[in-house]
Image (cartoon, grey):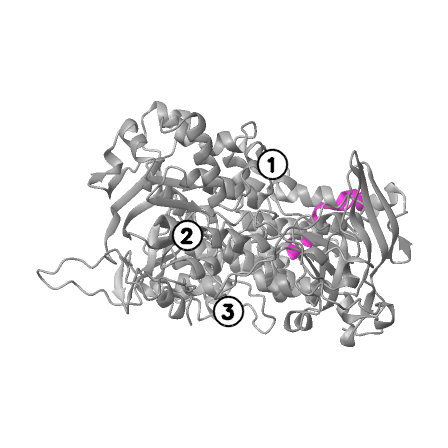
Amino acid sequence: MNDRMEPVVSVRDLRVWYGTERGAVRAVDGVSFDLLPGETLGLVGESGCGKSTLGRGLLGMLPEGAQTDGEIRFKGENLRTVSRSRLRDMRGPELGMIFQEPLTRLNPLMRISEHFEEALRAHTPGISKDTVERAALEVLGLMGIPPTRYRSYPHEFSGGMRQRLMIGLALVFRPAFVVADEPTTALDVLVEAQIIRILHDLRREFDTSLLLITHNLGIIAEACDRVAVMYAGKIVEVGEARQVFRDPQHPYTRELLRSTISLSTTGLNYIPGAPPDLTDPPPGCHFHPRCPDAMRVCEELDPIDQELSGGQRVECWLHGPDHLIGVDGRDRLRVREELSVADEA
Amino acid sequence: MPTKPEIQGTAHAPKHRAPDEVLVSMQDVEVYFQLRGGSMARLLGMDTGSVRAVDGISLDLRKGEVLGLVGESGSGKTTLGRALLGLVAATGGEIRYAGQDITKLSTRHLRRLRGDLQMVFQDPSAALNPSMTIETAVGHPLKIHGLASGEELHRRVADALERVGLSPPERFMFKYPGDLSGGQKQRAVLARAVILDPVLLVADEPVSMLDMSVRAKILQLMLDLKRDLDLTYVYITHDLASAKFFCDRVAIMYLGRVVEVGRTEEIFADPKHPYTRSLLKAIPEPDPEKALPRDLPRGEIPDAASPPLGCAFHPRCPEAFDMCGWERRDLRALIEAHWTRHEALDFETERGTIANLDDLDEPSHEAVVAAGRSSSPVDVEDLLHRIREEDADEPLWRGVEDMTLTDGGVRVRFHDGADPRLRPAGGVEVACHLYPEVEPAAGEGPAS
């Protein structure tokens, strides 16, 4: 990607928390990243790391009671602070969301044509049926849905087709920024591969910037330019996908890759323990109790965002800065906290 | 490259069992579900058709092995797994276990077998009663079968929890499923499954609801349980990567049939069925140097109530040829795919050429593409020729015997095709016309 390009989305120190009886759940805890035009950024991490909360938070789709802080800069506006009605106007033409369960998002009583008419009319009152049809058929064609099915009902489509429909509905406006939350998790292998292909081709067809949330590292490798690894509400590593997969710099990224069962798996690896309770995460680096490389400094001080070569960023004391690590700060944590097998996600 | 972990301590010891002792033998197992149809159809007693969830499967399960049933949703893998335990009634064939045919057993007799045959389900949250403590849930089978009570029950539950890594047991016994994480719940489900000391465990997607970082832990636990308790597994999954690691043999399923079966190493090293090959190519690998191929099979698994003629995979198969069973519905899909690729305007002008695509929905080796009101049979022929020129490599054309003009349109006749049966190819068995079917020599029984 071109370094001089202006980012479409620029997130700075975003925080999202929920008040509960046990205290605040800090689901997103100071996240910063940029998304360039036409770029696909993968967001990966275990369940309960705040991935979905971050994705929804960017589009202002958080449930009641969620508190936010920080900045989400999009085309000169701060999405975090714009009015609800402004945000509603932007959803569709500027901002899109693709969910995991397509059937629950389509109205079973409405034909596909009516879905498109409703969506487009909400933002362009008085748009003619023909114009809607032409726009819809064009995007459906790119999704591989025959024009003969335009007047069908959602139940007449297979699961994979419905997900294509949802993607088509999100993209018919050619929005500048789309969040896709586990878009292929409910699908079969071959259909998943078809959808990944579509997402992969998005940048060429639509010039849309995509945040792709998934727990599947294979999908990231396949469809993303860059990857951000999230742990306990923080982005612990972000960089060019190839680079991060080839040479992960954060022990969490490395262990996550090692624990993934792929066709080349010859032995089972896993990360002991589970992501922490976000009301009371461990002090210092949140990953230190599970980290095979944990040092004394890791349980004492919060790690600092370090920029490595190639624009890769990592929050891990292994990468310094040295002047902040005390004399015995690099000592191995003597006993890595004994984690019972059963303390798992 | 070894795909199975070396288990220390057993490498030098000879296996104490015959390697090929058959534990369960399935012969032509069928599970058909009758469709209800409309009220009128039922009133008139019309045949409303059936879904062939499992359509004539013969497989032997050997003692001590891990057999994988691998396929997409709708392949019948779960139904077959359930039929193995008598949880769903087979409508045909037989399943022999311990000298009896499970499909013929009464519920009462089946219940007696439940101690031997256990199942682990995909969603551990749904498999555990939310209002039962873990102790009650895990001890339930012992109680129901009247095998233990009181102190004895408590002790055996504690042992089972210990065995699945939920230790110390006191920490988990009095908890409710809601207090446990997904992985812990699946451990509890496994504890309940092994508490009756079963022989066979049918595990239906036991790790697919779990986080990547936990999957390996549960699979490792299952390997440990298998070794310690001398279990045999049927592992049902859509995930080829875990099947490759976990299974001794795999059966690849498609639309109620086994399309390829053999030793895991062999199937993964040299997949024979085009479906198996596609599945393997379609797995997104966490390796940025590998990219998904462009030639992925189109479409999705078809409706089992009205499966394709010939080989069920032919409409999606990149290697299909004349005898694979081409038919009317494939022609419809081809015309629709043509319009999908083109501008909306072309569709506007061309849609009138053909009278009604819905006429092509019945399965038949012959199709009449009727001309629309304002077009002639020659226009239809031109359209079909244009489609053919666009992609001459399209496998469907290999199945066309002839195309003739008729009064109202174009008649397309396809080769009859045939439904491929399983046949040996290399060291595996595969149901595909790409491999010649060898008749077993006289006097020789069919290979299993």
Residue at image location 26% in from the left, 56% down from the top: B16
Which residue does the numbered mark 2 point to in the structure image?
A: B329
Q: Residues within 10 Å of mark 2 (few under 14, many from 20)?
A: many
Image-based side of B357 in relation to B442, left or right? right
Tell which residue pokes out farthest to the bottom in this image: A309
Quadrant containing the C terminus of chain B in the rendered view = bottom left
Which callout, 3 or 2, points at the residue further toward the start of the chain? 2
Chain letter behind tag 1: A
Residues tagged by mark 2 and mark 1 found on one chain of the structure = no
Task: Using the image, tell me which numbered label, if any, was put on residue B390.
Answer: 3
Q: The residue under label 3 is which amino acid type?
A: Glu
Prevailing SS of the magenta stretch: helix
Chain letter behind tag 2: B
Q: Which quarter of the figure has residue A251?
A: bottom right
Image-based side of A65 in relation to B234, left or right? right
Give coordinates of residue B45: x percent, y percent: 31, 26
Give coordinates of residue B210: x percent, y percent: 56, 49
Task: Tell us which disc is closer to us: 2 or 1.
Answer: 1
Task: Using the image, tell me which numbered label, if any, was put on residue A108.
Answer: 1
Give coordinates of residue A149: x percent, y percent: 56, 48
Chain letter behind tag 3: B
Give coordinates of residue A278: x percent, y percent: 75, 46
Q: Nearer the viewer, residue A213 or B393?
A: A213
Circle 1: element type: loop
**Residue extent of the magenta highlight:** A120-139
Spatial separation of the CA atoms under disc 2 and disc 1: 26 Å
Image-based side of B12 in relation to A177, left or right? left
Q: Magenta stretch: residue B329 in it?
A: no
